[in-house]
Structures are given as structure tokens and as C-alpha cells.
Amino acid sequence: MTAPEKMFPSGNQPPSDYDRPADFKALVCDKDVQVAMRDGVNLAVDIYRPDAPGPFPVLLAFGVHSKEFQGDEYPKTFPPQPSWSSLWMGHMEAGDTEYFVTRGYIHVVAQPRGWLKSGDGGSREWDSFDLIEWIAKQPWCADGNVGMIGIGAFASEQYHAARQQPPHLKAIFPYDPRGAYGVLGGFREEYPGGLIHSFRYVGDHVSTMHTARGAPGPLSPEREENWRLALQNPDYKMYPFIHNVLVQKGQTFPRFFDTLIDPYDSEDVVKKAEDDFEKINVPTHTGAAWYGYTYKTHLCGAQTYFQKIKAPKRLTLNGPAHLDRPLRALRGDMLRWYDHWLRDVDTGVMEEPPVRYFVSGANEWRSGQDWPLPETQWTKLYLNSWERLTAEPFKSSSVDDYIPPDLFVQMPPTQTNRIEKLRFLSDPLPHDVLIAGPSVLNLFASIDQDDTNWIISLRDVGPDPHVRTAREGEREIRADLPSRELTRGWLKASHRALDPSRSKPWKPWHRLTREAQRPVVPGEISEYNIELLSTANLFRRGHRICIEIACLDLGSGVLGATNVEYIPYHLCRSTPVLHRIYHDPKHPSHVLLPVIPT
């Protein structure tokens, strides 16, 4: 890496010494090639290759996002946009075609059946397998060497293909995959804690899935019953644009419709995923980034896959700003990975620590041997009276027994745009504190309804040079202090049931099944174990650690849209809810933080 890269690291990708100049100046594209699957259904495939005699190793990008947004032509009129651009669109993520092709790879971009120009009918289960094996037989494919590339939807297909073990798939680079439990993702890691959010509703406005809209037809008896129940859900009816998806019975936004009528995980799905992890045996470089906490599935899935698979593996966790689109980040890492596994070049990629992560606050990269980091010191901070966050535990048989709960009342968004919350803050820190990994809020609370949505935010507040005393001007913490959200956690109160056999202190495992869901008894104190998705942050001396507790967030656009594609809002309660938060010796509400020695 260059000296400036060391001095000014980017959160979009780790610094890298690896690159090589282009070997070829021109490329050619075979557009809309029809490739027959085992049952005769054709897939539409674009093949980008060097304008030179081959053969070459192949990088396949296979996913549901439109292939017309990928390739070397679109960036000529739509250059890479940062995440804060109003034109940013996540679907442009198959990889930098020109970069890889001019360095001696063939880039194949394809979509499964039922999407855009590909055919219809039958099951897409084996489409990626069949396409990989078709590529390996082509005269332009060097020695049958095939890897897979692309992030997001393209990453999910990589894990799906790896489970099926096609003989010619040599390595994968599934950055930003979907959740690990389920075929191409699933409920658990897309909707942590069982809270439904609007990500699929917003993102599928640019879907290329084949659909036909007419008079709504019948569903299977089970789905018909689920649909009728969902139609009557008052929390859904509070969002008419969401309820409209139900009214049309899945003719629009079919993936989101399926979630609305059956918003649960399945024990069968989980067990199958656990069995299938062992099938992934190709070298795997996975990852996600701290921006992923807002829509969950990528950040959750990458960490789960890294923890569960036994293949040669690497994990990269980038910073808080989403990657440019069209995608150009990580191309040096991808080139290094595939030069090693497809070209047999000693790039040194397997000699480095397996985990790299970006530390916000310090704005620097660190490495580790596993994730969560083995050196983690799991540290409790207790919620205390007057919205304080302290390290001192409560003492029984003391005045601590009489500390009353804090409380807030939230009206639904049909009555207010105001989000009520409690905000627990530590004192200004006497020294820097580094955290890296997941956190958990263990919360004792009661509500006056049979359900609510817990939405928890971990924030870095400060610097704050002031003290809090009885003197005028020092009684309250200033409201205008800088505040940066690091991550969030969620739990639908009725989904509080845990699976003890799968839970860890830093990762509570909620069952999230229809059978395990239990209404809350109004007024009864319950314990809620709420995972806050992983992050890494250096809290500087003089800053405060902050935990915010709320139950509502709001869309930022009209007709259910948001200003940012990957920052969705959640479907919240349609009735006012009173929340009481307890913190005393019998109810020691606390946050468990992953403190890293420095």
C-alpha cells in the first residue's frame, strides 16, 4: 500500500499492497446468450471476455438483480456514486467488469429463471450449479476454473451454489450475503427479533421478477388462512401502502407478501441450515460492514457463515458508509483472492490473520484470529436511575431495592411523528474504550399491552467536557452534544422466548416461530434479551456511552418509501403503549459490551 493509504485509510475497504496492471486493453461481450438448464429452461447470460485468444479463468456473477445494470457499459454514463448520492442504487453489485476482464478473467453475468430475460417454469434450485458446469465445458474457460463474484444478491447465490458442491467451483467471495438460515436467506437474519421492516418493500420497486397482475386468485388452504389473518392485523392496516401488498394477494412484491402472511422462522429451516454448513468446503472470503445493521441480513449472514463453515475462510468487516455503486470497492482483494485460487499465484492471502475489521472513532483497520475476537472482555454496564449507565452492580438488602422504574408512553404514528425514548448515558470516559463485536441488552420491563417492539440504539456521545452537579447550568446533560449511532437491536416482545441450547451470553437465540410466540401479560415484568448487531468503535476519552430505548421508528418518504434504500423503518404497534424499565437488585437491567484490551 502507498504511504497516503496508510495515513488516510478508507472504511470502504482495507488497505492492500496487491494489484497488477491490466494485461488487455479491450474486451468483447456476448450478450443474452441462452443457456439451457437440466429441464430445458433457458437462462439469459452476458459473457464479457478479453479481446484476445483464451482460455481464461471465469468469475460468475449470478443473481436476481438486473444484468442490464451490470457490465462495462453502464458505468460510462453512470459513474460510481457514493452512498450519500440521491442516485445510489444497491443493485449495481456484480463487480467491476472492466477491471477483471483487462486483468485476464472472463466475467459472466446471469439471472435465474423467472427474472428479466431468463425463461420461466420449473424450479431454480439447480440453476447456479448447472450454469457453473456449463461454463467449465466452454473452450474459453481455462482448465474448468470457475469462481463467483458480486455482492448482495450475487453473494447469496454463491453460498447456495457452494452447498451443492459443483465440481468446477474453486472459490467464492460472498461479501454482503443474505442470512445463513434458509434458501437464499431467511426470516431469522433478515428480521432479527421478529420485527418486520420495509427493506424488501422499498428495494423491490426495481425488481425484475416476472409477475402478472389481474384479479387476485386463490392460494393454498394454509396460505389462504394466513392471508385472511394478516388482512385483519391492525398493525399492518396502519400502513395502507403495506396493506395494499396484502390486498393484491402477492401479485406485487411477492417476497414481501410471503413475509407479511407468515412472519415467522421455522425449526425445520434452522436444522437444515445447520446440516448444510458442512457442505460448504470451497475457500470462502466473506464479509459485510457496519452500515449493514440497518437492514440486518448482510451483516448477520456474513458473521454466521464465517463462524459455521469449516472451509479455508476470511472475514472482512468494513466501515459505516455503504460502498459505491456501480461497485468498485474490494476489487483488489477479489483479484488477490482469485489469483491465488484460480491462477495458482502465491499472493500471500492465506498467510495473514483471517479477520479484518474497521474501527469507527479511531478510523483504522485492525485484525484478529476469530470473530467474535478471542480476547474480548465481556463487560456489563447497568441501567440505573435518572437514565444513568454505570459499572456498579446493584446491592440487595439496600436502598437499591426501592429504585422505581423509568417509563415512557409511545403513541402510534397515526397520532404523532414524535418518537419517545429513554436515554441511558455513562459518565464521560476517563480513557479510551474499544469495543468490537455484538452487544446484548438484558432488559427487565413491563408494558400495559400484550405486545410491543423494542428498538435499542447504541450511540457514541461527545466529547463532553462538562460535569453534572447541582449547580445552575450543570444539572442536565447538554442536548446538543454530538451523537453518532453505532448499531441497533430489535425484539418483538411476544418473541422473547429463547432456545437455551443455541443461545450464548453475547448472542441470545430467539425461537421466532409461530408456536413459540406468546402475548405479554400486561403489567407483568419480563426479561428481554436483545442482541445489538456487531460494530467496532473506539469511544474516546471524554465521550459517553449511550443506550437508547424506544419502540417506534418512521419512514422518511411518501407512500412508504425512505430517503435511503437500506435504512428501512419497522411496522410498529397501532395502539399507545406504556413501557416501564426496571433497574434494581431483582431486575438488574444491563448492557453486555465486547470490550477489547488496547
Image (cartoon, rainbow, N blue to C red):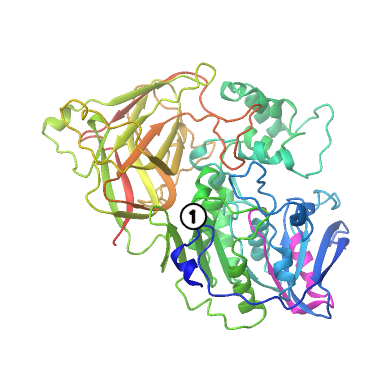
Q: Is residue 182 left or right of residue 317?
A: right
Measured as percent of width and height from the top left, residue 226 is found at: 65, 30
- Residue 266, visible in the rendered structure: no
Given residues 562 and 184, the one toward you in this image is 562
Mark yes or no: residue 16 visible: yes
Instruction: Point out residue 496 in the picture as x, y percentages from the top left corner.
Output: 42, 37
Q: Is residue 139 magenta?
A: yes
The x, y position of residue 290, in whole percent, is: 49, 51
Q: Is residue 112 shown left or right of residue 165?
A: right
The residue most toward the top is: 415
For mark 1, give the secondary structure: loop
Q: Nearer the viewer, residue 232 or 410?
A: 410
Residue 390 in the image: state x and y as whole percent.
23, 41
Residue placed most toward the observer, 18 or 252? 18
Residue extending farthest left: 398
Q: Residue 58, located in which quarter of the rendered image?
A: bottom right
Q: Nearer the viewer, residue 359 or 245?
A: 359
Image vertical order of residue 570 relative to residue 281, above or below: above
Image quadrant holding the C terminus, namely bottom left
Residue shown at the point (25%, 43%) measured from the top left? 428
Q: Is residue 184 above or below residue 458?
A: below
Label 1 CA crowd tier, 10 Å (few <14, some 14–19, many 20+): many
Residue, disc 1: 319
Relative to 6, is 556 above or below?
A: above
Name the amino acid type tagged 1.
Answer: Gly
Range of magenta residues? 127-153
The number of numbered badges drawn on the structure is: 1
Rendered image quadrant of residue 278 = bottom right
Magenta span includes 45 = no
